Amino acid sequence: MTQPKIVCVVGPTACGKTKLGVLLAKAHNGEVVSVDSMQIYRGMTIGTAAPTAEEMEGVPHHMVAVADPAESWSVARFTAAADACIQDILARGKLPILVGGTGLYLDAIVSGRDFAAGAAGGTVREALQRQLEREGIEPLLAELRQVDPAAAERLHPSDTKRILRALEVWRETGETITEHNQRTGSLPKKYDAVYIGLRFADREEMKALIDARVDEMVERGLLQEVEALLARGVPRDATALQAIGYKEFLRYEEGGCTLEEAVAEVKLRSRQYAKRQLTWLRRNGAIHWIVWDKGRDFDKALQEATEILAARG
């Protein structure tokens, strides 16, 4: 069976993925699917750099502002919703263009592999959580060593979240998470993905652009966006408010730092995030890189990307 073709525009934050995605969609009869774990939340346009109506230029964008900020979406829920968008785009004879920097989510969508059973809030997870609170992590880690020694060896004792997850999968299904990953990892990928990556020749230019974008977010009202979320009753410990830009401004709002300190922290965290994104992407040898050198020439990038797509048929 032939795998449907999709395009994935990847790269670190502030590299121009949104703009190139729109240009490719307009040139190749496509629609954009955002693959960003935070752009899904409503009322968070500024801090997540979600595309505005003006930036979309009339191109349909999916998976943007589809969730309440009080919700917490798992990777399984995200990929199921995004995949439904992709299938709909393909059914209408258009090209899905996946744009975003959340590498784990993108990999999961392209592979199409299912996720092991279990979910936060389930009865098994709650029982494990109560046991953790009563007894600490050691008894749980000892159980994991018995049933899934490979996972126990792989996980650090302080990684309680993944230890509980591994035990949850075992208790619910009788299959270890290691066995599940090995079984699903051998399956063929669901989509034939053409990866187009954007990165900077000069790291300092990337850092400068990130800093400038944070300053622009502040000018556009990032603090007011955080305050509006709190006013709507979004819990302070909600996943959405742990995103870069929100967590730091929440601390400022609570009196834990000055505004200048909050802005500096957002810039630092954003630069660190960009570095992590590049580290993740380097593992993917299928990416065709377009390297920005002294500014971002989108006309040239579109031409290069179009040539890459033509070469892939």
Image: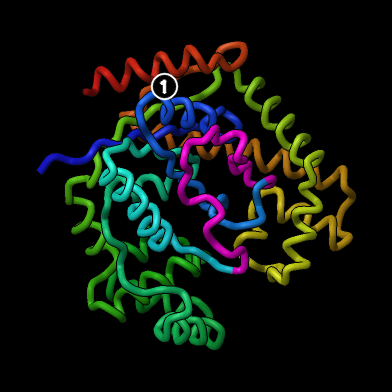
Q: Is 263 or 45 nearer to us in this picture?
A: 45
Up-down relation of residue 191 to residue 135 (above or below): above
When asked about the image quadrant of residue 288, the answer is top left
Image coordinates of residue 267 in percent, x first then y, are 72, 38
The residues colored magenta run: 46-70
Q: Main secondary structure of the magenta part?
A: loop
Q: Residues within 10 Å of mark 1 (few under 14, many from 20)?
A: some
Image coordinates of residue 185 in percent, x first then y, are 23, 52
Up-down relation of residue 251 to residue 170 (above or below): above
Residue under numbered circle 1 = 289
Check residue 60 for magenta coloring: yes
Up-down relation of residue 147 to residue 273 (above or below): below
Kind of residue at disc 1: Trp
Where, quadrant-wise, is the C terminus in this rendering?
top left
Check residue 82 for magenta coloring: no
When asked about the image quadrant of residue 260, the answer is top right
Q: Is 190 or 145 nearer to us in this picture?
A: 190
Up-down relation of residue 21 to residue 263 (above or below): above
Is any part of residue 149 visible from this angle?
Answer: no
Image coordinates of residue 224 in percent, x first then y, are 81, 53
Residue at 35 percent across and 45 percent down: it is 107
Image coordinates of residue 289 in percent, x first then y, are 41, 22
When asked about the image quadrant of residue 103, the answer is top left
Is any part of residue 39 visible from this angle?
Answer: yes
Residue at 67 percent across and 43 percent down: it is 269
Q: How many marks?
A: 1
Residue at 74 percent across and 40 percent down: it is 217
Judged from the image, the secondary structure of the residue bearing numbered disc 1 is strand
Q: Is 31 or 143 nearer to us in this picture?
A: 31
- Scheme of colours in the image: rainbow
Where, quadrant-wise, is the N terminus in this rendering?
top left
